[in-house]
Image (tube, rainbow, N blue to C red):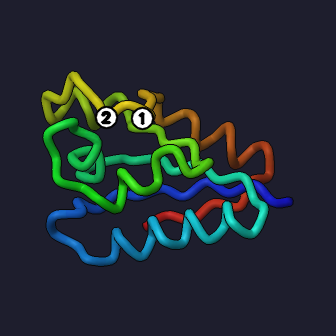
Amino acid sequence: MAEYLLIESRDPFESNDVGYYCDLARGLVEAGNRVTLFLIQNAVLAARPSAHAPQLRAVIGSGIKVLADDFALKERGIAKLLDGVQIAPIEIVVDHLEAGHKTLWH
């Protein structure tokens, strides 16, 4: 079993590729891997409770740990998140890299 950190930076309302990335995350978990999805930059917009983001909602609760960058949230004035999304600092990326997790940035 491998450990993956998938970093998503794109706004799902501007890029159709975000859905592919969520599918990739689910596929990795279904193959027996551990996956963390880290939302940064405009990707945090999908973590708002009022956002229509079915791809992210499908990821939550599927065995994937979903994190949102605290700085990106503050920049965008986002205080409330979907249930299942946790706030985390960008330093989490360094922790995953140091631990040898396979990391992909989108």
Residue density around tag 2, few if under 14, some if 14–19, many if 20 or more, within 10 Å: some
Residue 67's disc number:
none
Along the line of sight, the residue nearer the viewer: 39 or 54: 54
Residue type, numbered disc 1: Val
Name the quadrant of the C terminus: bottom left
Element type where label 2 sits in the image: loop
Element type where label 1 sits in the image: strand
Residue 78 x %, y %: 18, 29
Distance between mark 2 and mark 1 Cα atoms: 6 Å
Q: Which residue is mark 2?
A: 82
Residue density around tag 1, few if under 14, some if 14–19, many if 20 or more, within 10 Å: many
- Relative to residue 26, is residue 57 drawn left or right? left
Residue 56 x %, y %: 36, 54
55, above or below 90, in the image: below
Kindly indicate the quadrant of the structure image that contains residue 12: bottom left
Task: Look at 74% across and 69% down and name the residue there.
Answer: 31
Task: Look at 48% across and 56% down and name the residue there.
Answer: 7
Report the number of numbered marks.
2
Task: Look at 24% across and 56% down and name the residue there.
Answer: 53
Task: Look at 54% across and 58% down and name the residue there.
Answer: 6
Q: Which residue is mark 1?
A: 85
28, above or below 78, in the image: below
Residue furthest out toward the right: 1
Residue type, numbered disc 2: Leu
Q: Are marks 2 and 1 in contact (CB under 8 Å)?
A: yes
Residue 62 x %, y %: 56, 51
